[in-house]
């Protein structure tokens, strides 16, 4: 028997959010407070159920799934090359990384060789993306701490990166620039010079950020000795990226297990010492400079050659060939209508995204659509560090810690 | 990644300790995979953890429809000092999709196990808080299964929430 709307509402209200009973503590009554999902400091639609004792957070449970869009399911319905724009939209601040994690996995299955020039172009774009992602993190985090001025500075530089993306690919975000086998087209003339100009500006500007923040008394009070999590806990929680490096573990896949020609570049891995919020800030800030370093080296050493594999079974033929070559026309038609077929098998491709290990698992059943795409998104795993980082701290520090953990909810929910 | 010989040595070491545990090994595109019996998953993961594969990098659910047994869980283990990865894989039948939880070994398996439960309906025995994580709590079905249809999901607004079948009953 249907009782109408009220029944659904009642069920929604009565769902239990906690497996552990929250109630009377030993001395003081615990209070359960809902934070989010529409809260300016949660950087997306993250909902937190806080158990408070006075102003002290005793337990925290993240509730996620508000922007779950079934991207992994959608990917199973699409030909491999059509999956790229879909996966790019997961972690919307690191779209080049998402695209590369997927393309790299498919290239592994296909055993396609990616030309050196394409690898360098990928590195340049990924590092620009890393800078952009860290700038968004810095700007929004400083808003959470009450420093709105920093946001304008960070977004001023972010605009420049987006302009560079627009120049090379036509889009500012979700560019679909990476393709299986390489990149969609070569960089336009003058782009390399603009990139060099940008890295020069970025270095100066990041000095200005330091001048603004590093010794800022208010900033230090909010950052130092807050949200500390030790290295062992982070490793057990599966946390990677700047959070783990801030705790002193120099684990970086670009160095440890180089992919996409990262072994050609000279760069350092910034590490912290105590793993508090200040270390997290300093590590990401230093990473911006290291990314500038990598970009400069890649631009200077950019090899000549094709920007995408010559394998016509995988990559589209150049447009001008379609008018003169029957084979090119056939290949073009087959690729656009059906897509390429991928040998059956399963691979896992892990790369270092701005937030840690971004892994893409692809299972192929031999058809032109993947049978399973799973993204090990770093935000999803790193979000589990919220509880150990904020337990037994003040609720005011929770906001700062959450900002420094830098979860992107598009990546968490997928 | 361990090479093909290294993988066989690891598998043999596991067979010596747990005779029925290892079902198969696969070395594909430079990646090592060990298929294990579902009863011995915990033993194998603990043994590999002792051998240095102490970081649980990822946990995937897979549906092999129409093959049987259909469901599968993959644990991607990582040895951070040797920079080495190995995948442990278990196949589970649809009517008995149970496997031991590893949350007490790796607390970081909490969210991924909940995701696999949510998307595939695989129950992790011993998980402290096995609830749906990405889908709504009252959602029916496990959407990442291959036989779960795409599309047709009604969007609920206030004006039509009592008219959409399945939501108010």
Image (cartoon, rainbow, N blue to C red):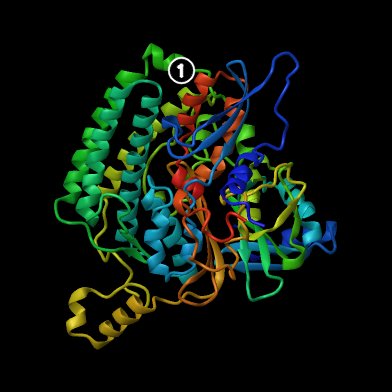
Q: Dot 1: what SS?
A: helix
Q: Position of residue B6 (x, y in %)?
A: 67, 60
Q: In front: A342, or A402?
A: A402
Q: Position of residue A201 (x, y in %)?
A: 21, 33
**Most distant residue in the bottom direction:** A326
Residue at the image point whose x is 46% and y is 23% from the top: A278
Is residue B83 visible in the rendered image? The answer is: yes
Residue at the image point whose x is 65% and y is 40% from the top: A14
Q: Is residue B133 above or below residue B166?
A: above
Task: Judge the density around disc 1: few (<14), some (14-19), many (≥20) Cα neighbours within 10 Å.
Answer: some
In the picture, measured across the screen, residue B56 lies left or right of residue A111, that is right
Q: Position of residue A353 (x, y in %)?
A: 44, 46
Q: Is residue B17 above or below residue A256?
A: below
In the picture, measured across the screen, residue A255 lies left or right of residue A168, that is right
Give the image quarter of residue A303.
bottom left
Q: Position of residue A178 (x, y in %)?
A: 34, 59
Residue at the image point whose x is 31% and y is 66% from the top: A308
Chain of the residue where label 1 is placed in the rendered structure = A
Q: Which residue is mark 1?
A: A222
Is residue A254 visible in the rendered image? The answer is: no
Q: In front: A103, or A145?
A: A145
Residue at the image point whose x is 42% and y is 27% from the top: A281
Q: Is residue A151 above or below residue A182?
A: above
């Amino acid at each position: 028997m249907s009782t109408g709307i009220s029944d659904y509402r009642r069920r929604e209200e009565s769902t239990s959010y906690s497996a552990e009973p929250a109630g009377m503590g030993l001395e003081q009554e615990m209070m359960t407070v809902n934070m989010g999902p529409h809260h300016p400091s949660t950087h997306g639609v993250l909902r937190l159920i806080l158990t408070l004792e006075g102003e002290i957070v005793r337990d925290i449970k993240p509730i996620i799934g508000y922007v779950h869009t079934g991207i992994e399911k959608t990917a199973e319905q699409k030909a491999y090359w059509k999956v790229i724009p879909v996966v790019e939209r997961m972690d919307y601040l690191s779209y080049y990384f998402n695209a590369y994690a997927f393309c790299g996995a498919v290239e592994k299955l296909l055993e396609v060789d990616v030309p050196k020039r394409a690898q360098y172009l990928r590195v340049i774009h990924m590092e620009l993306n890393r800078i952009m992602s860290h700038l968004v993190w810095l700007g929004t985090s400083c808003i959470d701490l009450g420093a709105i001025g920093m946001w304008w500075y960070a977004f001023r530089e972010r605009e420049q990166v987006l302009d560079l993306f627009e120049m090379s690919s036509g889009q500012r975000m979700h560019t679909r620039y990476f393709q299986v086998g390489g990149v969609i087209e070569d960089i336009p003339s003058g782009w390399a010079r603009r990139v060099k100009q940008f890295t020069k500006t970025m270095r100066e500007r990041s000095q200005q950020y330091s001048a603004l923040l590093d010794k800022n008394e208010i900033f230090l009070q909010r950052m130092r000795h807050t949200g500390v999590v030790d290295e062992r806990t982070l490793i057990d929680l599966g946390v990677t990226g700047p959070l783990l490096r801030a705790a002193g573990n120099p684990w970086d896949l670009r160095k440890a297990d180089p992919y996409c020609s990262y072994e050609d570049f000279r760069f350092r891995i910034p590490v912290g010492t105590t793993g508090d919020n200040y270390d997290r800030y300093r590590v990401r800030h230093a990473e911006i400079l290291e990314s500038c370093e990598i970009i400069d080296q890649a631009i200077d050493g950019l090899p000549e050659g094709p920007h995408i594999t010559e394998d016509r079974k995988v990559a589209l033929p150049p447009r001008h060939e379609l008018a003169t070559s029957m084979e090119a026309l056939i290949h073009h038609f087959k690729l656009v209508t059906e897509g390429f077929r991928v040998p059956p098998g399963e691979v896992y491709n892990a790369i270092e995204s701005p937030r840690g290990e971004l892994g893409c698992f692809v299972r192929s059943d031999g058809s032109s659509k993947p049978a399973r795409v799973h993204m090990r998104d770093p935000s999803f795993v790193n979000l589990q560090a919220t509880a150990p980082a904020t337990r037994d701290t003040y609720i005011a520090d929770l906001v700062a810690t959450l900002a420094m953990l830098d979860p992107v909810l598009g990546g968490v929910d997928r | 990644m361990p090479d093909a010989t290294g993988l066989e040595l690891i598998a043999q070491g596991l067979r010596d300790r747990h005779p029925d545990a290892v079902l198969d090994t696969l070395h594909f595109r430079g990646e090592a995979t060990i298929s294990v019996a579902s009863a011995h998953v915990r033993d194998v993961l603990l043994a590999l953890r002792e051998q240095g594969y102490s970081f649980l990098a990822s946990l995937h659910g897979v549906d092999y429809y129409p093959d049987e047994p259909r469901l599968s869980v993959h644990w991607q283990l990582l040895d951070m000092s040797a920079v080495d990865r190995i995948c442990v894989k278990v196949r589970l039948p649809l009517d008995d999709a149970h496997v031991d939880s590893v949350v007490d070994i790796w607390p970081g398996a909490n969210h991924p196990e909940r995701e696999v439960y949510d998307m595939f309906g695989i129950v992790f025995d011993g998980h402290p808080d096995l609830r749906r994580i990405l889908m709504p709590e009252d959602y029916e079905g496990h959407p990442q299964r291959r036989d779960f249809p795409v599309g047709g999901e009604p969007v609920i607004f206030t004006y039509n929430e009592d008219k959409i079948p399945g939501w108010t009953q």
